Each structure stands twice: as structure tokens, then as C-alpha cells.
Image: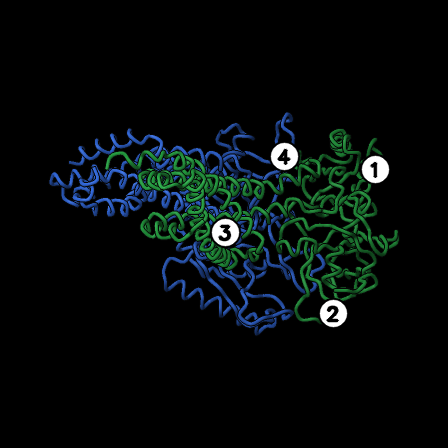
Chain colours: A green, B blue
Amino acid sequence: MEIRPIISTLGRHRTAALLIVLEIALTCAIVCNALFLIGSRVEQMTEISGVAEDEVVRVQLTGIGTDENSDALTRTDLAALRALPGVKAATVVNQLPFVSSSWNSSIKLKPNQDRPTLNATIYMAEEQFVKTLGLRLISGREFEPGEYRNFSELQGPGATTDLPVAIVTHRLAEKLFPGQNAVGKSIYVWSDKPTRIVGIVEHLVRPSLQGGPVSREDSIVLPMRTAYSVGGNYLLRTEPDRRAEVLKAATAALRANGPARIVLEKNTRTMQELRRDFYRQQRSMAWLLGGVILALLVVTALGIVGLASFWVQQRTRQIGVRRALGATRGQILRYFQTENFLLVTAGIILGMLLAFGINQLLMQKYELPRLPWYYLPVGAVALWVLGQLSVLWPARRAAAVSPAVATRSA
Amino acid sequence: MFAYYFGLALRSFRRNKVLTALMILAIALGIGASMTTLTVFHVLSGDPLPGRSAMLFHPQLDPQNKEGYVAGEEPPPQLTRFDAETLLRERKGDRQAMMTGGNVSITPQRADIAPFRVDSRYTTADMFVMFDMPLLFGHPWTAAEDEAHARVVVISKMLNQRLFAGENSVGRTVRVDKDSFTVIGVLNDWRPTPKFYDVFAQRGYDATEDVFLPFTTSRDLTMDRSGSMDCWGDNNGDRTALNATCVWIQYWVQLDSRDKVDAYRRYLTNYSDLQHASGRFQRPTNVRLRNVMQWMEFHHILPSDVTLQMWLAFGFLVVCLLNTIGLLLAKFLRRGGEIGVRRALGATRSAIFQQCMVEAGTIGLAGGALGLVFALLGLWAVRQQPVDYADLAHLNPVMLLLTFVLAIVASLLAGMLPAWRAMQITPAVQLKTQ
């Protein structure tokens, strides 16, 4: 196919050609960036939390006023919960994944370090923590029975914070001690006494999105028995199909145990529901971006159809002449297809530059990461396909022009 | 003439129904998306207290220890209880209040309503006057009640409805946690947007608290607090104690004139210097004093998704406009013959230009009307979203007007180039080819 005549024809329709190139470029740039935003959101939504989400349920309750005996009441609560039919394990936690409220501490590798190495979240664990959440230990050991202390004892005035052992996530271990075995190494959390890492779990995400995706698994588990008065979160592990029943039974058991307390029904749900809620905004943003991409592509396609039909109509006589001079239908069809390919290609090249420009802006303003290169070919292919599909109808109409048109009028 | 061109435009639309519909649809989609996101942006970035926000300031001090100190770094956004109580006692502003958020249990006297949990705010007397909070019944408490650690409470209209069926409940008793409080006032509908006075609690757009009671009382009864708290050094024991090394108090001060602002800044510097000299502050003096709008801007209260959506929508509008320009160009040039005849019959270039612009503007008007429908649909969709500002997404009259202005301006801009090209058509060439 000879390209030169196409280019010289386009040269005569500069304004229209330029408009369509601009439209394609802008569409390409927005689509690339929007796809990237969708990608990063989907990545967040499908993250592995480390928790056996389909087996864990949460009950949240709160006392009325201050409870002096919250430690003792927590013990009897847990005993009652563990005795329920269908409950494999139950524990009390200060915080949990997918519920934004969280406890955090700076972490140091040396006691006199001036600036902390990083900020990590603190899970306070009681005896059945690992079992209830279903964490997978990949190195070292779990806490030993003698290592647990009551959080309330560490709170009193003048109490010394002494936390000899901790379990960390694999990703945090890699961050703190890259390339080494972190088990047996010491860190400094909450105090100037060393805390030894005794175990490493495969995954455990932070409750909130604090610190962004890179800090998602900066989690430390400390052997501290907390009381229901700290956040009021009981977690129970059961069979997936007994979750509703267990939630109901647990609520009743807690209401029956001890003085009047308030079960926060709205927050008493399965882990999967909590996750769904937690990512609802991300999900709706992803759908919105998807909708915009679709609308952009449709509008651009309509623009191509409109302009191409106009050109076909305008050039009907020339097409007739070419046909009369021996051009086949296929050649006419390919003429318009090639023309479209050239326009779209020009648009894509301009669009790539624009896409990177927009990405730079987003990086500065919203601390987004760099646009990975593979989004560009995806955007390019999408627009090439779109261009070819939209030009098909006008091009076929052009090919259908009969050579006799050349002889009419004029 | 205008009416005539308008008639011509309508006739031209009838001739190219599909093309016209496409143009209107494209503009409407662009306008609908832009107006939806612009409305959300407008609502969320507005002034929470028009007329008062410029006079309200949030002071910041740096009471942290030497550890990890970097010169020039932003001091913590909140105050320690010690500093807040000192500033409050010294009363150097026209009005001032210290506060924090929390949760309390309410036990209704009627046995048929189970105890429930509500959001609370522990604050001091000036908050009500300073923030211009409207009271439905009763009045706010005064500094005397703050000092007396009085068991008084101001409740929201909603809570008043729930507990007292909406009657004037002033003087009646409410059980908050384990203690009895006397209702002193009932707050009418009041929802500053963004919720500037505590932006760290719920990303800044959640509903107003149901219970307001004196800060002093809340500490006597160790009521549950909520929101961000940042501690350093050795802070075993009660982190809400007077001398705890934790920042968790929001503090607002009203300063009625520029001079007073400057004087207050000097006062803060002086206070910080004194604290430094006494050894309580270890870092060099580093104070900030921002008013409401500066405060919200600095803390990026506006969710970044909202701005992102707005830019996305405007990008989409530009694509739609480019599309309209292309289609209008095609449409006008296709009528080259007709324009040639008109020119030959004596129409001036400017008459052709006007005619084309009227046609473009008409498309804009239709696009605006349809765009308004899309915007209303879009805002309805926003209200279905699980975000805490969802219920605020409504189109106001200004935005309604703006929709049409935007649509017509956009379509006129889009029509400019095609109209310019159309008026360049030389009659002779066109007539020859007929």
C-alpha cells in the first residue's frame, strides 16, 4: 500500500486530521493512567491478609463506663466463647485487619538510634491469637505460655515496659534484616530494652492503609493479653458455613456474661464482610474509572466514525474515479484503513508522551508510583483496535461506491 | 435574525439527526461528568463556617523530645493536655476552646430502649459561641461550669428526639456511661463541612457528635476518647494525664484582628521559649498558627480521589469537545454549497459565522439540559456510595446555572473553529461545483 498519497490527502485536511489525532492522544493518555489506577486498586483489593478470612468472625462490644475488672471479665468471656459449639478458637485483640483504628510504634535496630528505622503496627496477642487468625508460621516458633503478660500490668504508673519476644511478618523481617534470618535478632519497640524476634509469619496486614502499599505488612505481634475494654474486639474461628450461627451464639454468650454491656451490632460481622466494606471505596473508584474509560472509548470511536464518514462522502467522486481506473474494492477499503492506522498511530505517539506527563503530575500531587511501561502497549493496542473497528463501516461504504459515480454530474 | 438562525439550526438538526444526537450526547456526557465531580469538589472544599473561619486559628507547638529531631520539621498538629490547659487558662485570644472526641454509652430511662453508644466531644465553654453553634433549647455551659467539673451535657437534636421525643429536655437527666448528667442545651442541626475542628478522626466529613460535655468532667470520669494520639518518651501509665507526653488535644482560638493574630503568634513563641528554658520543651521553638482554611489545606482534608475524579472528568470533557469540534467541522463544511449560495446572495462572512455559532450554541443548550440530567444521575450515584460525605452531594442553584454556562461556553468554544472555517468558504468555488 502506497502511503504517500494518503499523507498528502491528510495534508489537505489538516484541521480535521489534527483534531482526531489530538482526541486519540488525550484518550490514550487518560486510558493508560486510568487503567493504571484501576490496576493499583485491584491489587490492593485482592491482597492476602494472612487471616483465614472465610473462617473468622468478629464481635465488638463496649462496657458502660470504666470497668475495673476488665481483665477478669475478658477471661470469663473467652472461656464462654471457646465453649460455644462450632468455635475452634477465640481470642481478644486490640486491633484487626480491615478496621482502621490501630496501634503503632516506631521500631529501632539500636537503642540509641536517633531516627527510627520504620513505623509498624502492634498486634497484642493472647494465647489463641495465631490459631484464631489462622496465621501461617514460616520460621521460628510461636510464643511460649510463660511469655504472655497482661497489657494492664504494663500500663500502671512506673511500670517497666519489658517485651522480651515478638513475632513479625516475613516482609517486615526482610525490611529490617535484608537477606538474613531475622529469628533471634533484636529490635527496639516501645522501650529501650531489646525485643527478640522468635517467629516469622507469612502474612499479616496492618489494620489501616497507613503508610501506603509499601508498609502494608509492617506488623509486629507482641505477647500481651489485652482486655475487652481496649477496642472490644473478640475474634472467633469456626467452619465457613457456621459463621452466622457462631456470631449469634457469641453475641448471646457475651450479653449473658457479666454486667450490662453494649454489643455494637453494626460492627459484629464476618471477616469477609469487614474486608468488603474496607475496600468499598476503592472498588467504587475502580468501577468509576472503568466507566470513564468505556465512555472515552465510545466517544472517540463515534468521533472517528463521524469524521471518516464525512471524508468518504466528500471524496465519493475521487473514489469513483479510482474505481473506474481499476482500483479494487479491497484497495479502497485498505486505503481508509491505512489512513486510520496512520492517524491513530500519530495519536498514540503523542498520547504516550501525554500519559507520562499526566503520570508525572499525579506522582507529584498524589504520591502515586510511576506508570509501569506495560500499560502503554495495552493502551496503544486498545486504540488501534478501536480505530480499525470504527473505520470499518465508513470504509466499507467507501468501497461500495460504484465506478459509475465518476461519470455522473460534474 | 437570531430567531431565524435558531430556526435554521433546528432545520439543520432535523436533516442530520444521528450526527446531531451524537454531538449532544457527547457534550451532555462531558458536562454531566464534570458537573458531578465539580459539585462534590465544591461541597467538600467549601468554607465550613462562612464569615467566621478567617478569625479561627489552630496553634501548634513542638513539645516533643530531642529524639529524631530534624530542624524546620512541622510541629505535631495537636497539643498536649498540659499546653492546652495552660493556653486556655491564660486566655490570650478573644475566645478559645480545647477539645477532643470520644465515645460514650447512653442508658435511656425508658426500659424499652437498650443502652447505645454515641460519639461525644469533650470541650470547653467557648466552643459554642466561637463556632456559632445554634441551640434549639437551653444554652451552652459557661467557664464556671468547666471549672466546677459540672455534670452538664448539650445533646444533639437527633439524640433529643431519641431520648425525649423531641421535647424541650433542658433540666432533664441523661445517663452518660455510669453517671447522671443534666441537659443544659439541645443543639439544632449543625454540620460544618468539612468537620474542620477534628480532621483526624474520620477523614473530616463525618456527622456532628451527639453529646457535648465539659472536658474537665470527661477526665474525672475517664471517659473513652477517640482520634489520633501521638506519644513519645516514657509514657507508661495514663496517656491522658495532665503531664503525659502525648499530643491529642485540638485547640481553637478566635482572633478578631490582624494585630491580635500577630500578638498571639508572639505569645506562642514566648510561651514556647519559656517552656524551652524551663527544660520542658527540648526542641527549639517552632510554632504555627493557621486559620481554618489554611489548616484544612495544609492537612489535605479533601480526599485525593475527589480531585482525581474532577480532573478525570475535565479530561473527558475536553475529549468530548474535541469530538464536537470535529463533527461540527464536518457538518458545516458538508453544507459548503448552501453556504456558498448564501454568500453569493449577499450574506456577509460575519453573518455566516453568527449562523454557525447559533447552531453550536443550540447544541450546547441541548447538551447542557441533557448534561443536567446526567449530573443529577451522577450525584444520585455518589449518594449511594459508602463515603461519609455521600449525603452532602446535592446540586445547588449556583451549580445548576454553572452547568448551562459551562455547556454553552464549551459548545461555543467548540463551534468557533468550524464556524471560522465555514465563513472562509468562497462562493465562487462552491457554485461552480454545483
Amino acid identity at mark 1: Lys
Whether callout 4 and callout 3 share a subunit is answered yes
Q: Which residue is mark 1?
A: A88
Query: Is any part of residue B145 visible from this angle?
Result: no
Horizontally, is A114 left or right of A25 in the view?
right
Q: What is the C-alpha distance between the residues marked 2 and 1?
A: 40 Å
Residue at point 74%, 47% (across, down) = A50
Q: What is the C-alpha distance between the residues marked 1 and 4?
A: 30 Å
Label 4 SS:
strand
Choose mark 4 or mark 3, whichever is in front: 3
Whether callout 1 and callout 4 share a subunit is answered no
Tell me if mark 4 has few (under 14), some (14-19) or many (20+) residues whose alpha carbon lies within 10 angstroms of its own. some
Image quadrant in which you'd find residue A128: top right
Q: What is the C-alpha distance between the residues marked 4 and 3?
A: 30 Å
Mark 4 and mark 3 lie on one chain; the one further toward the N terminus is 4
Q: Which mark is residue B301?
A: 3
Chain letter of the residue carrying label 2: A
Give percent across and percent down for residue A3: 42, 52
Chain letter of the residue carrying label 4: B
Horizontally, is A354 left or right of A140 in the view?
left
Q: Which residue is mark 4?
A: B116
Mark 2 and mark 1 lie on one chain; the one further toward the N terminus is 1
Give percent across and percent down for residue A254: 76, 34
Horizontally, is B421 left or right of A221 in the view?
left
Label 3 SS:
loop
Amino acid identity at mark 3: Ile
**Viewer-side residue, B417 vs B308:** B417
Q: Which residue is mark 2?
A: A111
Chain letter of the residue carrying label 1: A
Q: Are marks 2 and 3 in contact (CB under 8 Å)?
A: no
Whether callout 2 and callout 4 share a subunit is answered no
Quadrant of the frame with the N terminus of chain B: top left
